[in-house]
């Protein structure tokens, strides 16, 4: 029997643990190049979805859930489980594709906070809903069918539940023969469209940077006081907002829609030089200033800049312009911007909630 002094023994144990840890880390690094599942640098793909489906009575919610389970490998969970346990299960199993039908507004409000949650709502013609009623409730009469429709569809909670959905699928064709196929294809198409624009590390409804900043520009436009057109603008550098702007009369002057700009209130499409309203781009550029804009800044605007704004964009050092809607001066603006070496591109995001008609 060999006696080892305690301190020496502890040192040997430490060296052994450290050596094993280094070996494990080395294996993880090799594995992460393929699967990115190393314990020390764990990145789980997040194109996983938690689909919630609601709808009008007998609109085919059960058919949609079954299609996701059978055709896409989703795991079904049920809303009649204990609420706390259900929320806990969804949270712990965020790496699984889950689907549930739901009629509980309060529960959906809680589950909808999960980043992978996507809420679909369904609606269908009465003829199709009657067929579903006869399939699910054989032996009941027509009066019972209409009573259930009135009771559920026009319940305030049911109405708000459907209105909160991210994607609304409306069946326009009352042909019951291929109803299941149409529902399955529609949901499949929407799932693919949600996954396609995002990389695998992002939840399906997380907006891209372009969508994010263009939404901010659209939000800024809602503050416009011009009575002719709402326009919003955001200036960004290194994915950080530098300034926002919207069109309207300057500070301390009466708002345009309150009579502050005679030219706009007269409805005159000429005499642009007499307009008192600042454009959204002008407001943002003035707010930021050339020094704050710096190098490699991008200007997002929900409407293509006019010629006058384009000249100012060039002078302040903006390197990229991203716009959503076209404007009548597009060609003249493009010429100035492109001549100055500024990249110009059009980008439009899908407005929410999304309406799908099948």
Image (cartoon, rainbow, N blue to C red):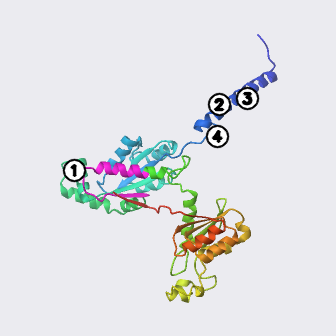
> In the picture provided, is 183 more to the left or to the right than 324?
left
Q: Name which of mark 1 and mark 4 comes first in the sequence.
A: 4
Which region shows up in magenta?
A: 166-190
Which residue position holds label 1? Answer: 134
| Mark-to-mark CA distance, 2 and 1 | 59 Å
Q: Is residue 255 above or below residue 325?
A: below
Percent coordinates x, y for residue 92 in the rendering:
52, 42
Q: Name which of mark 4 and mark 3 comes first in the sequence.
A: 3
Which residue position holds label 4? Answer: 41
Answer whether residue 171 is magenta in the image: yes
Which residue position holds label 3? Answer: 18
**Element assignment for label 1:** helix
Q: Going 34% across and 44% down the picture, which residue do you hit?
A: 66
| Mark-to-mark CA distance, 4 and 3 | 18 Å
Q: Residues within 10 Å of mark 3 (few under 14, many from 20)?
A: few
Which residue position holds label 2? Answer: 27
| Mark-to-mark CA distance, 2 and 4 | 12 Å
Between residues 84 and 245, which one lies in front from this camera angle?
245
Q: Going 25% across and 57% down the picture, which residue do you hit?
A: 174
């Amino acid at each position: 029997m060999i006696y080892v002094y305690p301190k020496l023994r502890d040192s040997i144990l430490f060296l052994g643990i450290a050596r094993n840890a280094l070996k494990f880390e080395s294996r993880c690094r090799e594995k992460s190049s393929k699967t990115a599942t190393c314990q020390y640098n764990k990145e789980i793909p997040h194109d996983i979805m938690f689909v919630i489906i609601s709808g009008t009575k007998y609109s085919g919610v059960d058919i949609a859930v079954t299609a996701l389970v059978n055709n896409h490998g989703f795991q079904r969970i049920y809303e009649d489980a204990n609420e706390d346990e259900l929320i806990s299960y969804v949270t712990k199993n965020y790496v699984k594709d889950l689907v549930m039908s739901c009629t509980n507004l309060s529960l959906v409000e809680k589950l909808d906070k999960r980043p992978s949650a996507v809420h679909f709502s369904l609606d269908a013609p009465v003829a199709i809903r009657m067929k579903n009623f006869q399939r699910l409730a054989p032996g009941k009469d027509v009066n019972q069918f209409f009573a259930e429709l009135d009771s559920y569809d026009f319940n305030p909670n049911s109405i708000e539940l459907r209105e909160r959905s991210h994607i609304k699928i409306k069946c326009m064709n009352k042909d019951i023969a291929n109803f299941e196929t149409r529902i399955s294809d529609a949901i499949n198409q929407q799932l693919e469209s949600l996954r396609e624009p995002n990389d695998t590390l992002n939840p399906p409804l997380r907006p891209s940077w372009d969508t994010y900043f263009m939404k901010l520009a659209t939000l800024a436009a809602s503050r416009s006081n011009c009575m002719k057109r709402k326009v919003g603008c955001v200036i960004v550098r290194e994915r950080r907002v530098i300034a926002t702007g919207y069109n309207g009369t300057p500070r301390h002057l009466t708002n345009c829609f309150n009579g502050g700009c005679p030219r706009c209130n007269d409805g005159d499409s000429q005499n642009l030089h007499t307009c008192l309203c600042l454009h959204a781009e002008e407001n943002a550029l003035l707010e930021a200033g050339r020094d704050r804009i710096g190098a490699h800044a991008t200007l997002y605007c929900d409407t293509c800049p006019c010629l006058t704004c384009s000249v100012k964009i060039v002078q302040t050092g903006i390197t990229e312009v991203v716009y959503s809607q076209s404007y009548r001066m597009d060609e003249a603006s493009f010429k100035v911007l492109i001549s100055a070496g500024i990249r110009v591109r059009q980008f439009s995001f899908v407005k929410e909630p999304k309406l799908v008609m099948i």
